Image (spheres, helix red, strand yellow):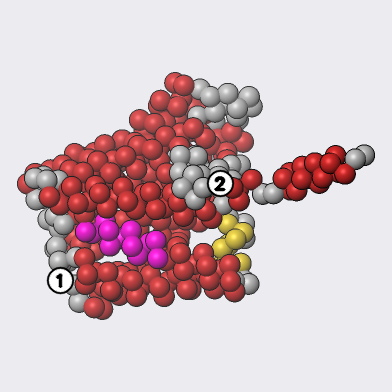
Amino acid sequence: MSLQDATDVSAERKSSSVDPSASTPWYRFRNDGSLHDRLLTAMILLVGAVSVSVCALVVPYGRFLSVVFAGWIAAMSVFEVVRLFARHHATTAYRPLWGALLFVVLLGPSIGALEGAVQGVISGSIALAPVYLTTIGSAVSLMVLLVVEGRSDLKRAQDFSSGLVVSFLLLGCCVPMLVLLSGVSDAILLLWWLIGVVALNDTAAYFVGRACGKKRLAPALSPNKTVEGSVAGLIVGVVAGLVLWELLVDFSISPWWLAVLSFAVVCMAQCGDLAKSYVKRVRGVKDFGALLPGHGGVLDRFDALITAAPIVFITLVCLEIVRCK
């Protein structure tokens, strides 16, 4: 082998050993689930959310944009769950009719909530009757589908219900509350407060857990979550709730009530994350989708926001800050 050949071989070996992601520009996704993709997706979502929020605050009846945002989360979350539960138990083939039925059943309460939120934007008073009716109808329909699916095989009935019941709690009970919250006055800033508390809790839990987390929080559901990260998330979330409320929200709440609300929001956010992980473990998938690089699907990203929304809405109703009819 000549010296030139040896040089070419050496250069080829060096080039083949270089990490391909190192040459990828920072503004392009690597599609490897890395922290780079996670941060880039978060930055794009942040820019988009700020732009939509500015339009919503300036344009007349701009609060409809917050309702559209919540409706989009509802529809995409239901779609992602239906993709998992509408497959045949043996062949895993997708069943379109079964999927359409599940989609209607799980999305029904959110459709009722959309009507209530629209009434809130127009008249200032949230309509709850459509949510009550659609939630009851969806629960009854889900029971019928469970009987049909497991009529001849108890194991099929157990597999169907084990994850779908939790999915109904997430999509049929919590998501409609997020939609209703998007229709209250000052909804844009309320949602920003909720997003800020949930995001800072998640960030603190992630980095503290990676840095010094030792004791597993729920290894059967989410092996990477730690008690140390959870405690850090609680502390940061409560502090963020107190600070961000003063900066963003005009509603007057005593510091005590606000601290309790922030604590409850963070607790529900963490429980929602674990509940989502349970559904994924039951169905044997890593993520609900791949729409958001580094995060997975819409439900993977907004699960904490979804499960924390009922606490905020119920608190505002109890304090008579939000009017309902």
**CA distance for labels 2 and 1:** 48 Å
Q: Which residue is mark 2?
A: 24
- Mark 1 element type: loop
Going by the numbered disc 2, the residue's amino acid type is: Thr
Residue 308 in percent (x, y) is at: 35, 58
- Mark 2 element type: loop
Magenta-colored stretch includes residue 215: no
Say which quarter of the image contains residue 73.
top left
In the image: residue 167, left or right of residue 70: right
* Stretch in magenta: 189-200
Going by the numbered disc 1, the residue's amino acid type is: Ser
2 or 1: mark nearer the eye = 2
- Disc 2 packing (10 Å; few <14; some 14–19; many ≥20): few
Relative vertical location of residue 243 with respect to residue 198 in this rendering, above or below: below
Residue 101 in percent (x, y) is at: 40, 27
Q: Which residue does the image show at 28% across and 74% down from the upper left?
A: 242
Q: Which residue is mark 1?
A: 252
